[in-house]
Image: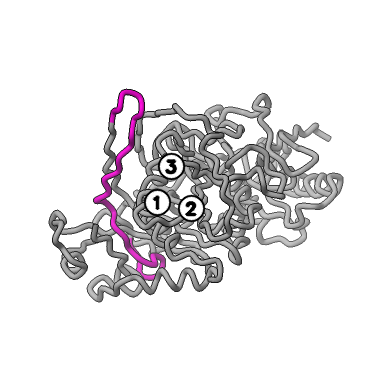
Amino acid sequence: MKLITILCLLAIWSCTTDEGNFVEKDSIQNITKSTGTVPIPDIVNNQIVIKFNNPLLPSNQKQAIRDTIQARHKFTIQSIEVCDCDPNGPELWTIGITQIGFLGVEELVKNLDSNASEGGVEGDLQFYINISNNPLSGLYSSSMSSKIATNSSPDIVNIAILDTGIDYSYFSGQFLYNTQNTNNGASGISGWDFVNHDKDIQDDHGHGSIVAKVITTELDITNTPYNILAVKAFDKRGKATYFDVVCGMNYISKLTNIHIINMSFGWYGRNQQSILRNLMDDVKNNTLIITSAGNLGLNTDEIENMHFPSGYRLDNTIAIGGYELESEQQNHWGVQDILDRIIIHKSNYGSENINLVAPLDGYNLVFNMQAGNRIETVHPIGTSFSAAYVTAKVAELYDRQLSVSDLKNQIMLTTHSLQRIQASIMDGNVLVRNH
């Protein structure tokens, strides 16, 4: 039997900073290109993402299942990477695909998901996810420990942001969710970097910091107490693997007091990705997830345009599109003035898949570059920031007495129903921003 290398397998649920055994993602050469006008991500044709339905199986039983799957589907496992922080969590298998009779990873994943006799594993494709380029000059002037929240009041809303990390130097006060006091074995002090495999969630791209700034700016206006948990799955180019996103979601799912998750990213097609979907569903009793719907102006109700994770339609998700205004908003405009001028142009749409629209643009975010007292103002555009705005509005409504379903209903009650867009957005729901 071929020796299988298992990466980062720890004896207990904890994070590791050992980077030595990890393969650079760019070294993966086996890519299958997609065709067509919708940007369906290219799959890595010698890797699959696996999750055991019973993660607590003894290691010898897991290995027996792996051996059975290899023999049945005519491939060999060359190495296994396990998610940081959870040795019993999802795995990334790099496989040899030259054996006669191997039908390809797409057929393999389909068979794993449909065949109960495989021993209780889920299988997903591995591919890359890209987010928009939102460069932000790095500040990096604060120590992370000085930003860790000390107040653990149950009335504080805890928000996870699965993105490029956060440049915490741009944010004042102690606002980072403290994982040191959790009882789930998480190492580090707040969040985790699944790109570099360490505890520093520093943002070297900008997108995650801008998403966080939209959220915290709104919450600071209303004096809503909050903690932010930044989980980094996207690198300095705004690129992530599906496996890193799964690992990030798996990490968040272990924390039972995260109330809202912001997921301002997505991909098209590849709709049979069950592991991420099921991890999102696993937190349905505790956590509401806000997802962005994409920016290509596509009808995501059509099968060929489907967008994920916004298209999962889970009870604990809200999919967010973005609206624009036909003319520049004036300070004296009221809600009706805004409703009269709303258009949906850049944002994706879909009356079945998109729950509501929020502002696509109009955000004036001020980042204090403390060195030299320089100010950087950012004006982001996209449904990433529509989702961030909704995340803030949901956080303002958070009450520990509310169930996830009640919280979702509460935010929907704050929307306006605009009849002329009901064919494009579910019930024509619009969350207006008039400041």
Q: Is residue 109 magenta?
A: no
Question: Label 2 to label 1, Cα distance in Å?
Answer: 10 Å
Q: What number is the disc on residue 226?
A: 2
Residue at which label 1 appears: 215
Sequence-earlier tag: 3 or 2 = 3
Q: Secondary structure at mark 2?
A: strand
**Residue at 48% in and 43% down:** 163
Residue 241 appears in the picture as rendered: no
Asked whether the beta carbons under mark 2 and mark 1 sit within 8 Å of each other, the answer is yes
Residue 337 appears in the picture as rendered: yes
**Spot occupied by residue 165 in the image (x, y as percentages of width and height):** 49, 39
Q: Residue 178: which quarter of the image? A: top right
**Spot occupied by residue 278 in the image (x, y as percentages of width and height):** 61, 59
Q: Secondary structure at mark 1?
A: helix
Sequence-earlier tag: 3 or 1 = 3
Asked whether the beta carbons under mark 3 and mark 1 sit within 8 Å of each other, the answer is no
Sequence-earlier tag: 2 or 1 = 1
Q: Badge 1: how crowded within 10 Å, few (<14), some, or many (20+)?
A: many
Nearest the eye: 19 or 312: 19
Q: Secondary structure at mark 3?
A: helix
**Spot occupied by residue 49 in the image (x, y as percentages of width and height):** 63, 46
Q: Residue 110: which quarter of the image? A: bottom right
Q: Residue 172: which quarter of the image? A: top left
Eye-nearest disc, 3 or 2: 2
The magenta region covers 349-374
- What amino acid does circle 3 point to? Gly
Residue at which label 3 appears: 208
**Image quadrant where one finds the N terminus:** top right
**Residue at 36% in and 41% down:** 132
